[in-house]
Image (cartoon, grey):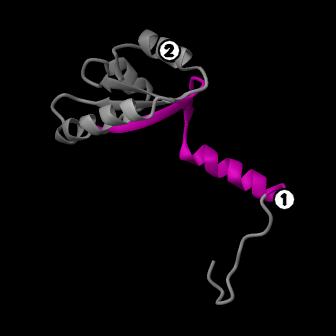
Amino acid sequence: MVQIIKDMDELKTFLKAAGCKLVVVEFSAKWCGPCQKIYPLVHAMSLQYRNVMFANVDVDDSQELAQTYHIKAVPTFQMFKQAHKVTLFSRLKRAICCYRSGFMGEPYISDNGNE
């Protein structure tokens, strides 16, 4: 089930209730065609992936949240883990750190010189 979030207090409560689960928040608008098309997929995923919590924020109804999370276009998806925003860039930083520490070993280079 997709939880409708209307303000910062509701989002904070939702993130806290999620504990260690991944939280996917869709920022959308009622007038947005792509948002309308993707919502059924998000809803289906919320039923299929019970270990992930899903929420929806209407940017017109929750302008404070849209501004706080720097939403410039809809639909926009942001993910959170333990109430902290998760970004792909943070994963990249972690991979670089692991590589530099020698944890990941040397990169694989094939015989023809292509990685």
Q: Residue at x 29, y 25 (%)?
A: 59
Asked if the stretch drawn in magenta spans residue 101, the answer is yes
Q: Looking at the figure, which quarter contains the C terminus?
A: bottom right
The amino acid at mark 2 is Lys
Q: Residue at x 64, y 90 (%)?
A: 112
Q: Give whichever of 73, 6 is nearer the camera.
A: 6
Q: Is residue 69 left or right of residue 83?
A: left
Contact check, label 1 and label 2, Cβ < 8 Å: no
Residue picked out by circle 1: 102
Residue 12 badge: 2
Asked if the stretch drawn in magenta spans residue 32, the answer is no
Mark closest to the chain's N terminus, 1 or 2:
2
- Provide the secondary structure element on which disc 2 rests: helix
> Where 114 falls versus 56 (above or below)?
below
Q: Is residue 94 left or right of residue 87?
A: right
Q: Residue at x 34, y 25 (%)?
A: 56
- Provide the secondary structure element on which disc 1 rests: loop
Q: Residue at x 45, y 9 (%)?
A: 9
Percent across and percent down for residue 61 are: 26, 18
Q: Quadrant of residue 3?
A: top left
Q: Looking at the figure, which quarter contains the N terminus?
A: top left
Q: Residue furthest right?
A: 102
Residue 37 badge: none
The amino acid at mark 1 is Gly
* Magenta region: 74-103
Q: Give whichever of 68, 84 is nearer the camera.
A: 84
